[in-house]
Image: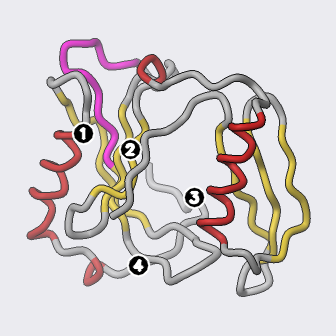
Amino acid sequence: MLRNSGNLPFSLGEIDIAKLPAVLKAAREREPSGNPRIMIAKAIKERVAVGKPQVMWEVRLADARRRAPAFGEDVSERTVVKLTPDGAVASVQLPRSLRPKVDKLNPDAIVTALEKFHTSLGQNARLFEVSFNNDQAQLAMVSQNEKVMTFEVALREKLEETSP
């Protein structure tokens, strides 16, 4: 069942279906088991605080040798790859068991989270609050259209991230 998850609407004209094979191939190449099975591929246009939103592909993959999780089971052993419309990898979230561990509230983890906020949102973002707990850093800010937006960065596990 499809639902509005807070993402922005987009037209089919914003998706180049001819690029889909390249998108899926690039996603499969980032699944670390070497036996990728695509669990879901979806196009989304996420809200962003800085810059122009664009349609991105989000592909969730699993090791084809493992049993697929049943409805409601933990899906943290999936690889999540976000890609630009032409198939360039924007970010990769590795399965939980392969992510390097980070100490809770380690100052380096907090600095990394703040740097991600700064890089993503810019130095002139108007904030209501920045908070840290043993799982995540979170901030609330006013967006360009004067709506309150919340962003979170995980502190426990580092995510492998690349730029397009």
- What mark, if any, has residue 30 been given in the picture? 1
Q: Residue at x 81, y 69 (%)?
A: 141
Q: Are marks 1 and 2 in contact (CB under 8 Å)?
A: yes
Q: In this picture, is 81 found above or below 5? A: above
- In three-dimensional space, the C-alpha distance between marks 1 and 3, rounded to whole angstroms, equals 26 Å
Task: Please name the residue shown 19% across and 13% down the image.
Answer: 65
Q: Amino acid at mark 1?
A: Arg
What's the magenta region? 59-69
Q: Earlier in the sequence, mark 2 or mark 4?
A: 4
Q: Return the residue nearer the eye: 22 or 74.
A: 22
The residues tagged by marks 1 and 4 sit, at their Cα atoms, a distance apart of 27 Å
For discs 2 and 3, the disc positioned in front in the rendered view = 2
- The image shows residue 149 at horizontal and vertical percentages of 75, 67
Residue 5's place in the image compared with 136, above or below, is: below
**x 26%, y 13%: residue:** 66
Q: Report the Cα–Cα distance between label 2 and label 4.
A: 23 Å
Residue that carries the numbered disc 4 in the rendered image: 10
Secondary structure state at the residue bearing disc 1: loop
Q: Which residue is mark 3?
A: 5
